[in-house]
Image: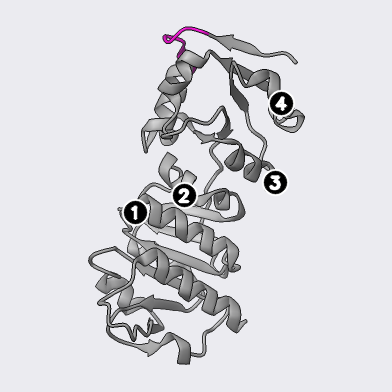
Amino acid sequence: MKHTLIQSRDNAFLKDLRRLAHESAAYRKQGRVWLEGDHLCDAALARGQHPVVAVFSESFWPLVPAHQARAAIKNVVIADALWADISALESPARMGFVLDLPEAGALRPHAPTVVLDRLQDAGNVGSILRSASAFGFTQIAALKGTALLWSPKVLRAGMGAHFALHLVEGLQEDDIDALQVPLLATSSHEGDYLHRAALPWPCGWVMGHEGQGVSPALQRRAARHIRIAQPGGEESLNVGAAAAICLHASAAAR
């Protein structure tokens, strides 16, 4: 199958790919995202995504499954000696896709939504995206200060959930007023216990900063405050774990 072979470290495409793989905000400058590894790439294909470029290591190229080799208009093969410069993984994968960055658009007022309030950790953000997709939420509203949704670390942690969700980032607190679903704010110390609460659907769950929690401004916007019973006595839960519990409770209550 036709392909372009890259053997020079100074190749312009290779330099762009290296930035996409290692710099959190590079996707904003290039308007493209980099998916590394067959699992993430296959998850994107299963969600109907069409890569612009498929990229393979030279040693893997003869072994590439047909569905990956035919996925993109253009195939690029990179010399093995250069692949480690691109990869951001401890054990580099042998292939990846470059996709055009999807257009975000405006918030969808009536969509079941997860609001991310300045979450710092990319692993937490990606985990929450996976939970949102699994439990029937269709929109992520990320306030400014939240880890960039299309950054390489969030993409890896999301494991394909990005492509099942409407993602809007860089929002201000006032922008959340566009949502027409009741907001449920998580709290470690006040509000109704989750296991006793009658949860509305659709709704918007607000997940707060790892250390500071939900901001006072968003707390005031919330229709209800919800806390999770912790009989073991821990002070608080990791926000990714809390989100999974809350979103599952919404799904179970539907």
Q: Give the vertical position of 5 relative to 206 (above or below).
A: above
| Residue 210 picture location, percent across and down | 28, 63
Between discs 3 and 1, the one toward the N terminus: 3
Q: Give the vertical position of 74 relative to 136 (above or below).
A: above
Query: CA separation, marks 1 and 4?
Result: 35 Å
Between 118 and 211, the one lying in front of the other is 211
Residue 200 sits in quarter: bottom right
Badge 3 crowding class, 10 Å Cα cut-off, few under 14, some 14 to 19, many 20 or more, is few
**Magenta stretch holds residue 205:** no
| Residue 79 picture location, percent across and down | 53, 13
The quadrant of the picture occupied by the C terminus is: bottom right
According to the picture, the residue beneath numbered tag 1 turns out to be 146
| Residue type highlighted by circle 3 | Ala
Q: Which residues are magenta?
A: 7-13
| Residue 96 picture location, percent across and down | 57, 30
| Residue type highlighted by circle 1 | Thr
According to the picture, the residue beneath numbered tag 3 turns out to be 46
According to the picture, the residue beneath numbered tag 4 turns out to be 69
According to the picture, the residue beneath numbered tag 2 turns out to be 157
Residue at the (61%, 54%) spot, across then down: 164
Counting labels gives: 4
Query: CA separation, marks 3 and 2?
Result: 17 Å
Residue 20 sits in quarter: top left
- Residue 180 as seen in the image, left or right of residue 74: left
| Residue type highlighted by circle 4 | Ala
